[in-house]
């Protein structure tokens, strides 16, 4: 059930991709997700030495024979080196984020790598399709981290109508209801970040996971709208200070003083007050840290139940 074109494209059992989250999704999380039948993704967004990424990829290759991906965050100045490296290491899938991956698509494609850019607009979805992307992740503003402006609900059907490659919905999805809703919008699968960050296998700091469990519906905010780098995080002291700087139109230096290293501070050191705890709006739904396999199993079971319930509404 719920086998889609995306499953065949990626070689997975469930049409679910784990979001590549800087400082959060390492080889161990990716392996757990891939072993559970979805697509695990190693994030490269935070990596400053390509050899560190090579080590992560090799760890994943040792621990699983299933497909996994690498996420190349395009604002990282080493992005083109990461592309070379995934080609050398024979990584089967690349996702990209925070920019236009155009110049990298053809060489990845020619090497047999499946290319799945994350986009936040119809225009970029159409463009990457033209440039040879195999599928697109369409991410709504409900997502955590670096975000676009449109909601998942509004953006996904518009992209579905505009492209012929498989569409993967992301942003605000963390359970079987969200999964089913995404398919109803015409998506062929989902990508989830926040839900997998709150898993047993994720090695992010325990304080980060506790912050997720405490968070309620209105506890995320978007910082950086005024500087052109909107990022959704859990509201904490850092976020409040950031918003204050934005109100008084502070200088880039002042933003950098607060912002540089903030994600590492939260994810690695566990400073969830003066660090940047990126999280999607759905974080309020997360009540328990669970093993990845249970998360996926429960999503599929709930989606099936909800679908049966909908079918019963139609009398059959
Ligand atoms: O990439 C993400 N989310 C991220 S990356 C990240 S790493 C980071 N670390 C510190 C500070 C800031 C970021 C944290 N979260 N999601 C995928 C995504 N891509 N969302 C939106 C976009 C996007 C936005 C505009 C993609 C392309 C785009 O177009 C730009 C263009 O050139 O057309």
Image (tube, rainbow, N blue to C red):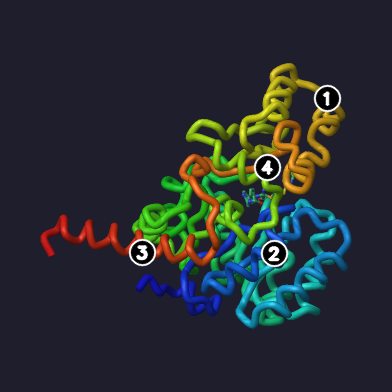
Q: Earlier in the sequence, mark 3 or mark 1?
A: 1
Across and down, in percent, residue 314 comes to 14, 58
Q: Residues within 10 Å of mark 2 (few under 14, many from 20)?
A: many
- Callout 3 touching callout 1 (CB < 8 Å): no
Query: In whole angstroms, how far apart are the C-alphas of marks 4 and 2?
Result: 21 Å
Can residue 141 be seen here? The reply is no
Across and down, in percent, residue 307 comes to 27, 61
Residue located at (55% from left, 58% from top): 125
Residue at numbered disc 4: 207
Q: Residues within 10 Å of mark 3 (few under 14, many from 20)?
A: few
- Callout 4 touching callout 2 (CB < 8 Å): no
Residue placed furthest toward the top? 248
Q: Quadrant of the N terminus?
A: bottom left
Residue at numbered disc 1: 251
Across and down, in percent, residue 177 comes to 37, 53
Residue 312: image quadrant is bottom left
Residue at numbered disc 3: 301
């Amino acid at each position: 059930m719920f086998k889609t074109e995306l499953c065949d494209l990626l070689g997975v059992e469930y049409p679910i991709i784990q979001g590549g989250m800087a400082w959060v999704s390492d080889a161990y999380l990716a392996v757990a997700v891939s072993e559970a039948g979805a697509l695990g993704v190693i994030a490269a967004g935070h990596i400053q030495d390509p050899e560190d990424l090579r080590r992560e990829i090799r760890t994943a290759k040792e621990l699983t024979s299933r497909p996994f991906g690498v996420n190349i965050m395009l604002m990282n100045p080493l992005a083109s080196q990461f592309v070379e490296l995934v080609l050398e290491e024979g990584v089967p899938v690349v996702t990209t984020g925070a920019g236009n991956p155009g110049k990298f698509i053809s060489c990845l494609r020619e090497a047999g790598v499946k290319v799945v850019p994350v986009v936040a607009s119809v225009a970029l979805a159409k463009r990457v399709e033209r440039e040879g992307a195999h599928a697109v992740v369409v991410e709504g503003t409900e997502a955590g981290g670096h975000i676009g402006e449109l909601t998942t609900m509004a953006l996904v059907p518009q992209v579905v109508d505009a492209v012929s490659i498989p569409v993967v919905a992301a942003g605000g999805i963390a359970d079987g209801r969200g999964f089913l809703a995404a398919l109803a919008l015409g998506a062929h699968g989902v990508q989830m970040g926040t839900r997998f960050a709150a898993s047993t296998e994720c090695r992010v700091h325990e304080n980060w996971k506790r912050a997720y469990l405490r968070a309620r519906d209105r506890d995320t905010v978007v910082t950086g709208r005024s500087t052109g780098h909107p990022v959704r995080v859990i509201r904490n002291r850092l976020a409040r200070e950031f918003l204050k700087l934005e109100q008084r139109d502070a200088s880039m230096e002042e933003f950098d003083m607060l912002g540089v290293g903030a994600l590492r501070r939260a994810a690695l050191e566990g400073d969830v007050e003066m660090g940047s705890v990126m999280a999607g709006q759905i974080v309020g739904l997360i009540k328990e840290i669970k093993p990845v396999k249970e998360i996926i199993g429960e999503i599929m079971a709930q989606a099936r139940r909800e679908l049966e319930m909908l079918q019963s509404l139609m009398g059959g």
